[in-house]
Each structure stands twice: as structure tokens, then as C-alpha cells.
Image (tube, grey):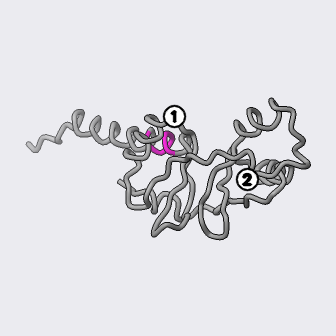
Amino acid sequence: MKNLKDFVSDQELYYTTTGTIVREAVAYMCEKDIGAVCVLDGDRLVGMFSERDLMTRVVNKDLDPQKVKVGEVMTTEITVAEGNESIQVALERMRKFHCRHMPVIEDKKLIGVVSLRKLLLHDVTAKEEEIKLLDAYITYAPVRME
């Protein structure tokens, strides 16, 4: 089974900064077709900004997305995973803490982000392969030699 470092190794790293205007962050997220983006202060992970943050902390509070900065409305209490953790451990942590996006770090540096959707898709695909192998094993009938 892959660990998270392997899982995120081929993905592009998307992030923004605390000083980015919310409107710019939203445009970036739309351009990249992502639902959440990591927020960095220098190279230090300080939060996540998601579609939910936009709705609950900007739109619902009638703040101007052209003026408010990501650092003012981001989620700061985030759940992270280490690169050497398994996909199953990550899925369990995301379930436990009710998060849909989780940054992956290694040596205190951001190396990627996993989404619940992509992890579940990977898990289902792996289980389908396992079922095919088990089915082939169960239904295998050796050829009789006469």
C-alpha cells in the first residue's frame, strides 16, 4: 500500500498566503479546480482556506471579498498528516476530524494535500483489484491432465 508521500508525489502543490485578497484566492481555486488551498506564511503552513470558509466567514458575514485577506478568514486549526503515513491512517483521521482536505507534511514542510474524494477513490480501486484477485482464486479450476 502506498504511503501519503507516494500518493502526493506527482501532484502540483497549490497554496496562497495570508496576505492574499479573498477574491484572488477564489479565482486561483477556480482556475485550478480545487475546493481548498493551503495558506503559507513564508514556507510555514498556517492554515487552509476552503469553499466552506468562503461561505461561512465571508459571504455569510457580508464581508467584501475584494478587501478581506485570506489570513483573516482561513481555518487555523487544521489536521495534518505525515508523508510516511498510510492512506488508511489518513482516511481514518479525516473521518475522525470531519475534514475533506488534509495537508501532508514532511520535515515540517508542506509536500501536498489529500482530499477525501481522491483517497476514497484510490481505496475503492484497490479493493476492486483485491476482489478480482480473490474471485479468480476462488473460481480457478485447474485443467485436468488425462
Q: Secondary structure at mark 2?
A: helix
Mark 2–mark 1 Cα distance, whole angstroms, equals 22 Å
Please rate how many residues cluster around mark 2, counting C-alpha atoms within 10 Å: few if below 14, some from 14 to 19, many from 20: many
Q: Nearer the viewer, residue 38 or 63?
A: 63
Q: Which mark is residue 98?
A: 1
Residue positioned most to the left: 146
Residue 103, x across and y down, in percent:
55, 54
Give the quadrant of residue 142.
Answer: top left
Q: Is residue 115 magenta?
A: no
For this view, does 113 lie left or right of residue 34? left
Disc 2 vs disc 1: which is toward the camera? 2
Residue type at numbered disc 2: Gly
Q: Secondary structure at mark 1?
A: loop
For this view, does 31 lie left or right of residue 83? right
For this view, does 62 lie left or right of residue 57? right
**What's the residue at 44%, 61% (across, down)?**
83
Residue 82, x across and y down, in percent:
43, 58
The residue indicated by pointer 2 is 71
Q: Main secondary structure of the magenta part?
A: helix
